[in-house]
Image: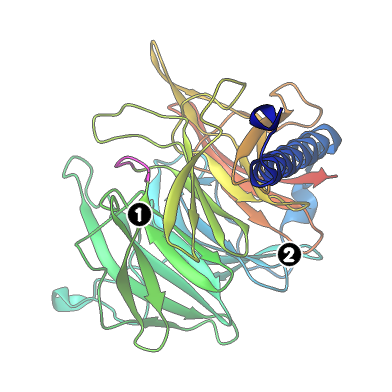
Amino acid sequence: ASGSATPRSATASSSSRSATAAGARGRMMSAFLLSVTMQASLTASWQPVPAEDAWQRTARTSSPPRSGPTASADQAGNVWLFGGYAEPEGKPRHVVNDLLRYDGGSGWQQLQEPIDVTLKGGRVCDNRPGPRLATASCVVGDEMLVFGGWDPQTPGTGGVILDDVWSLSLTKQTWRRLAAPMPGGPASRHVVCNVGGTVILHTFRCLDSVLVWDAASETLKEQPTSGTPPSSRGLHVAAAADGHTLVVFGGAAKDGQMVNDAFALDTRSWEWRPLAAGAGERPSPRAGACAAPLPCGRGIVVCCGAEAGGEGLVPRADVWALTLDDSGGGEWSLLLGEDAPNAPGPRNAATLSPVGSGGLLLHGGWRPFVSTYGDSHVLKVEA
């Protein structure tokens, strides 16, 4: 009889393991239900900004349609937009270096007109960035930082990839060229994001590290990373999913192959992890999309971009949310299709920025080889 009895220690150990497993299953189920509930309750809508309200009456000029600029939002909900390809009606597009600001109460205003930064004798003006597109920017406190980009210069030359770093004072609206260039060399079609006060820059070179802004020295410094990083890519998008998580989505490799994978970088451990890697609906492989933090939860919003089609680039105007759960995973959900009421025309190379009303401002963009947009739309995402 005693030989068939279960030892007390074994029973306690088994009970402990069962309780631990049950607890883990419970936490996983809670995280799953939270994610499902969040996705099921998210609603989104487009609201175009009327053309007569988009520009301040006091503006000296209005901005032509443009693609490929960079835009960043400050804490007051203003959107600051710089550069890009401008395409005035009836004229060829050209790269610019003007500065615009969007205020939800009064619309867009052009604060600085485009200028030629090359002076007589070939000297380059040092108090304004030169024309560029495919650059990256973010706001930190009272300044907007602009990193690198591409100046196409004379058509057919290929232009020049840039490595300069600039700071714009948002109160004075004056520029400073910072002494240290981007480490590793020039870069364009990259992303930069302010994640809980940490500025992180990701380029096609960032396989086992990222670049982090050091405000004291006004330099970018290499930060080693671990885990499973994104493959080398450009024309991808990034946004802060919460105060310590950077999410990167999509883009294209140097050979033009587009992807639709997503990765999260935890700034507490500097470890990458893939997101939503299993089966399920997700955005198509695309490049030149735009992204912003999810206004009502942990995650990001992705919209627009261009797919690779049989006869060239195919622009999109769908809207997706990638929500994160407490277990470290993520799940995609389609918020709006291209036939949604008031949906903007399909485009890539647009900007998407938080605005003071709690919405996201979409501006400009390009319908490949058809037209350049100069319109603005507010995307509302609510739980």
**Residue 220 percent location from the top left of the image:** 32, 73
Q: Residue furthest top?
A: 310
Residue indicated by mark 2: 56
Q: How many marks?
A: 2
For the point 42% across and 83% down, the residue is 215
Q: Based on the displayed image, in which of its 4 quarters is residue 58 positioned?
A: bottom right
For the point 70% across and 46% down, the residue is 12
Q: Is residue 281 left or right of residue 202?
A: right
Tell me which label, 1 or 2, sits earlier in the chain: 2
Work out how far the residue at label 1 is from the one at label 2, CA to CA, in angstroms. Answer: 48 Å
Q: Is residue 195 left or right of residue 208?
A: right
Task: Let me know if residue 86 appears in the view.
Answer: no
Q: Nearer the viewer, residue 56 or 100?
A: 100
What span is in magenta?
228-233
Magenta span includes 232? yes
How many C-alpha atoms fall within 10 Å of the one at disc 1: few (<14), some, or many (≥20)? Answer: some
Picture disc at residue 226: 1
Q: Nearer the viewer, residue 110 or 279?
A: 279
Amino acid at dot 1: Ser
How many C-alpha atoms fall within 10 Å of the one at disc 2: few (<14), some, or many (≥20)? Answer: some
Q: Secondary structure at mark 1?
A: strand
Q: Nearer the viewer, residue 128 or 187?
A: 187
**Residue 246 percent location from the top left of the image:** 52, 55
**Residue 237 percent location from the top left of the image:** 48, 46
For the point 55% across and 74% down, the residue is 197
**Residue 156 percent location from the top left of the image:** 18, 40
Q: Quadrant of the N terminus?
A: top right
Q: Is residue 370 left or right of residue 22?
A: left
Q: Nearer the viewer, residue 125 or 228?
A: 228
